[in-house]
Amino acid sequence: MRVTILGSGTLFPDAERGSASHLVEDGDVRLLLDCGAGVIQSLARCGADWRALTHIALSHFHTDHTGSLPALLWALRVGAGERGPLTVLGPVGLRARMGAMALAFGDYVLDPGFPLHVVELGRSDRWSDGELQIGTHPTDHTADSVAYRVECSAAMGYTGDTGPTDGLGRFLRGATLLIAECSSDDAQPIEGHLTPEAVAALAREAGSELVLLTHAYPGFDRGALAEAVAGAGIPGRCLPAGDGLVVEWKGGRPVSASGGPRVDGP
């Protein structure tokens, strides 16, 4: 299992960080978690085989998490050649959103020239496709937002955007990697988002060995946020995620392989 941080930023323009998107590769699975602005360029910079994408899972419908979906579908239609099916998953309302995208951008959004499956997931749902298993849990951000638990040869968790949410840590228990939003420090909480104290509580309950922080708003030092999470007491390590950071599992444990400091364990 291999995870690449494609977009670690927010909706604000940033020369170094795109909006939310993360690539999970495991066997034949190529899963994109969210599809925010900048993902196409980041896929190219990381040398990822974007033509081989098998699944896209959207945590909610804000623009910084979905904005590149029409462009990515166009790239796949024009540049991917013969390819297998693509499954797009998301909260209830996904079909209507993609229908609106088709009206705005063109019929290719729903008919890209290869089999496209659109799957709406409930806020406490389970879905599987071969070795890939995906679970959802409601998050305190929008009326339909979800966190994801992804299981292939290993388990990982992705909060999407969320404030502190009852039961989320239990849902993510056993996820050795946790990609968690952390938008601000504890002194300046932002409604619907996490601070270091809340991330640390989540990581403790999940038992995650490696926590990657994303979605820090401008004005907040990402390194300081990660230090605050670690200082609050977690079972493993915490790093500020940057675009291009790659995490691989070796010996059943996640290690940072490239694009960031190497992690050899807690």
Image (tube, grey):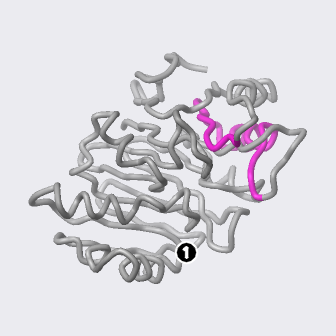
Picture coordinates of residue 6, whole percent (x, y)? 44, 41
Q: Nearer the viewer, residue 180 or 234?
A: 180
- 213 horizontally vs 189: left or right: left
What element does badge 1 sit on? loop
On screen, 178 above or below 193? above
Residue sticking out furthest to the left:
82
Picture coordinates of residue 249, whole percent (x, y)? 41, 30
- 79 horizontally vs 103: left or right: left
For image coordinates 75% across by 35% down, the residue present is 219
* Quadrant for the N terminus in the image: top left
For image coordinates 58% across by 45% down, the residue present is 13
Picture coordinates of residue 137, whole percent (x, y)? 61, 63
Q: Amino acid at mark 1?
A: Gly
Q: Nearer the viewer, residue 145 or 61?
A: 61
Picture coordinates of residue 78, whole percent (x, y)? 17, 61
Identify the magenta region. Answer: 192-217
Residue sticking out furthest to the right:
187
The image quarter containing residue 73 is bottom left
Which residue is under mark 1? 122
The image quarter containing residue 160 is bottom right
- Magenta stretch encompasses residue 196: yes
For image coordinates 24% across by 43% down, the residue present is 49
- Magenta stretch encompasses residue 33: no
